[in-house]
Amino acid sequence: MTAPAAAAARAGGRIARIAGHLWRRSAWVGLALYALALGAVLGLASADWATRGGYPFGGVTVGAWTIWPRAGATSADPYTRAVNARRGEIPLAVGEGLLMTAATDDAGRGLDAACTYSLTGATPPARAWTLTVSGRGDPDPARPPVREGFTATEILRERDGRFAITLGPEAEPGNWLPSPRETGPLRLALRLYDTPVAASAGSLDRDAVPAITRVRCRT
């Protein structure tokens, strides 16, 4: 091999080694960028999932209801605070009251706006309470708003102080709570104000909360 040919071969080898090094380096950089992008997407998706519905942690289940005794506590976990911020709500503090939510009936079936439910019984002792219903997403604009809930002072009661509320899409006699849409999942929120059970929510008996029974559904 002549001297010029040998020099050209050495130069070609150096170029090949440099190109290989650059390729490996760019491959590592691309892999790192991919991992960062994937982590960001998964992190945002998991945060959205964790804060989209109700509180993910700290609930106490009694019948169909879940009690959230620490939702308004200063020591609430970051996910609970994120849910409050996303909803734009100021939760009840520990000394102010107690929040209870329900997304299923007593049989464990999800509450559906196309079905009619009977809520019967009583609430835990409290100076006042409110019961509201909401659905996922915006209310149906074709359904004019009638009422979104009841308060302790306006509910019709039986002689023994217990009550019966009908939740459904069609008007019913008595305490009727209309569904906010034709179909879709529903969520009930029962807020107890100035209640002595705030510090002992885990000891509540099932009979102390309203029973939720499915009556019928549209076919």
Image (tube, grey):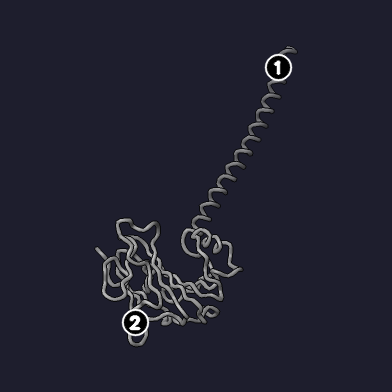
Q: Quadrant of residue 139?
A: bottom left
- The residue positioned 26% from the left and 69% from the top of the image is 171
Query: Among all residues in the image, which is located at the extreme left?
Result: 219
Q: Amino acid at mark 2?
A: Arg
Q: Earlier in the sequence, mark 2 or mark 1?
A: 1
Q: CA distance from mark 2 to mark 1?
A: 100 Å
Spot occupied by residue 215 in the image (x, y as percentages of width and height): 28, 72
Residue 59 visible in this rendered orientation of the protein: yes
Residue 202 visible in this rendered orientation of the protein: no
Spot occupied by residue 184 in the image (x, y as percentages of width and height): 34, 60
The secondary element bearing badge 2 is classed as: loop
Spot occupied by residue 180 in the image (x, y as percentages of width and height): 34, 62
Which label belongs to residue 119? none
Residue density around tag 2, few if under 14, some if 14–19, many if 20 or more, within 10 Å: some
Q: Amino acid at mark 1?
A: Ala
Count all numbered tags in the image, as a single digit.
2
- Which residue, given by chain and number where applicable, does mark 1 sit on? 8
Q: Nearer the viewer, residue 208 or 87?
A: 87
Which label belongs to residue 157? 2
